[in-house]
Amino acid sequence: MTAATLTAGPARGARGGAAARVVRGVLHRLLPLVVLVACWEGATRASGSVFFPPPSKIVKRMREMWLSGPPSHLYFSAEAGDSIAPSLGRMALALVLSVIAGVVLGIALGRSERVLAYLQPLMQFARVIPPPTLVPVFIVLFKLGTEMQVASIVFSAIWPVLLNTADGARSVDPMQMATAEAFRFSAADRIRYVIIPASLPKIFAGLRLALSLSLILMVFSELLPGTSDGLGFELTNAQSQSDLPTIWSVIVLLGVLGYLFNTILLAVERRVLSWHRGARKADS
């Protein structure tokens, strides 16, 4: 038996073990979902209530609405472009604006304790104002349409990012800042190489909250008068026609989108912050 054979055996075993762990992890995640859907199907069929259609009927309706297009369009129908695409576009724009403004202002406030102490009560007051109460103000400022919808999302989604970024920037290790000053880092270099990397765990924590708020407020903003497209408009239109399968289809789609976005964000967070976990292990 050669040395190559001896080394190839453990390598194949390690790959096989890793694949088995992945399969077990997927099964453990899917099993509760499969059981839940099966119970849901059985309960709704047994009750026969028109208000709670079975999952099979909901999935069929979702396919008819959004996945009945040609293969050249990845099976997305024209209705998907009229309802899903505008909603995701508004949400993405509002989330990007919230992250940019929240990170910039959060770093500025976090590095100035006096300014943060002055503005902290005002920010906490603005943070807890329910967005629906500000709809008349947004209508006056931006009128009905995409601008008002994006503004209502940004107003609520910015606070988790801003406050968490400020907390992260305030808690930067003084030794790191002293080292940066000893190496004569400019202000921009200190922000880029010291403050932002040290604040990334807090920034991602705020981003997860902002993502959830953006999805919720995206639907709420599209329920307002003057909206002509989007998932919220789809809900309102289905409600006016008592189209319960469509209502449940939109609800299920929102849950799927929320789970998908959160999974992608967690994967990006693990990738970006892998150095942070490695540094903590090295310190311990």
Image: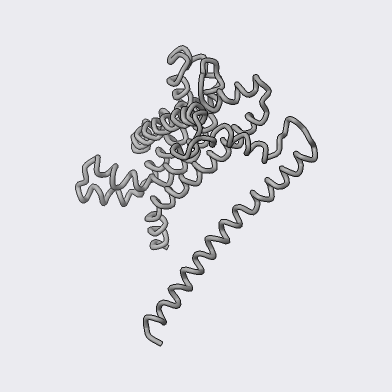
Comparing 142 with 7, the one in front is 7
Q: Position of residue 255 (x, y in %)?
A: 58, 38
Q: Quadrant of residue 26?
A: bottom right
Identified at 22% across, 46% down, the residue is 185
Q: Is residue 233 placed above or below 256 in the rendered structure?
A: above
Residue 18 appears in the rendering: yes
How many numbered marks have been drawn onto this rendered protein structure? 0
Q: Position of residue 2 (x, y in %)?
A: 38, 85
For residue 79, side relative to residue 34 (left or right): left
Check the picture and name the quadrant holding the N terminus: bottom left
Identified at 42% across, 34% down, the residue is 162
Q: Position of residue 68 (x, y in %)?
A: 54, 35
Check the picture and name the quadrant holding the C terminus: bottom left
Colour scheme of the rendered structure: one colour
Q: Residue furthest bottom?
A: 1
For residue 214, side relative to residue 274 (left or right): right
Comparing 42 with 215, the one in front is 42
Comparing 271 with 6, the one in front is 6
Identified at 71% across, 35% down, the residue is 53
Q: Residue furthest left?
A: 184
Q: Is residue 216 placed above or below 45 in the rendered structure?
A: above
For residue 136, side relative to residue 247 (left or right): left
Residue 157 appears in the rendering: no
Q: Position of residue 134 (x, y in %)?
A: 52, 19
Q: Residue furthest top?
A: 140
